[in-house]
Image (cartoon, helix red, strand yellow):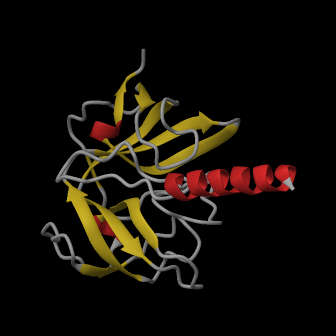
Amino acid sequence: MNRRMTTLVAAGILGGSLALAGCATGAEDDTAPSATQTEDAHGGHGSHEDMEHPADGGPVPAGMTEATDPEYPVGTEVTLTADHMHGMDGATATIVGAYDTYTYSVDYTPTGGGEPVTDHKWVVQEELENPGDERLPDGAEVTLLADHMEGMEGVTATIASSTDETVYVVDYEADGMEMTNHKWVVESEMQPAS
């Protein structure tokens, strides 16, 4: 009886710890991303459960404006401080593109259903349907053209936050997996490689 009680108490403590770990979120401001966004075992942006991110992010959308004088030019090695993906924080990355645009964190429910995705970082203005030229306000509803994750393309999303920082495409390795053309990382989510 005593052994059973010990097992039940241990299971309760473990379950409570897991529940608390799953509730971690970060407060956002206009330009600085949070360092405490949630991650899952599959490496998602925001709260993606059972969603895979492709190893090759592919080309950038048509119409992107290359940054004329980015802090980190193409070819520069940097250390990532973002934690969008499992193993990303602290990884060494190489800049493969730098762009001037508006960049958004969005909340949406995947087309196939499932758990809502919150605080997906990032989609750019050029990955939204008919966004116009102006920065869109927090709370605006948009249609996503991005296909970073399964079930993302074509959904209606709500803008959670935005920034006009230079946004980058990077190559990096995390947990033995090569990520190429990863979209997107904003300037405040990286630092010079040490």
Q: Is residue 122 above or below residue 143?
A: above
Residue in front for this viewpoint, 96 or 178: 178
Residue in front for this viewpoint, 5 or 126: 5
Q: Residue at x 43, y 57 (%)?
A: 60
Q: Residue 69 is drawn in which quadrant?
A: top left
Q: Residue at x 53, y 48 (%)?
A: 85
Q: Among all residues in the image, which is located at the extreme top?
A: 194
Q: Position of residue 108 (x, y in %)?
A: 42, 76
Q: Residue at x 60, y 44 (%)?
A: 179
Q: Is residue 92 above or below residue 158?
A: above
Q: Position of residue 169 (x, y in %)?
A: 42, 45
Q: Is residue 98 left or right of residue 6?
A: left
Q: Residue 190 is drawn in which quadrant?
A: top left
Q: Among all residues in the image, which is located at the extreme left?
A: 134
Q: Is residue 94 above or below residue 166?
A: above
Residue 102 appears in the figure = no
Q: Residue at x 79, y 52 (%)?
A: 7
Q: Position of residue 112 (x, y in %)?
A: 59, 85
Q: Is residue 95 left or right of residue 166?
A: right
Task: Pick the quarter of the image with the N terminus.
Answer: bottom right
Q: Is residue 132 above or below residue 172?
A: below
Count of marks overlaid on the render? 0
Residue 98 appears in the figure = yes
Residue in front for this viewpoint, 96 or 37: 37
Q: Residue 81 is drawn in which quadrant?
A: top left
Residue in front for this viewpoint, 66 or 134: 134
Task: Pick the quarter of the image with the C terminus.
Answer: top left
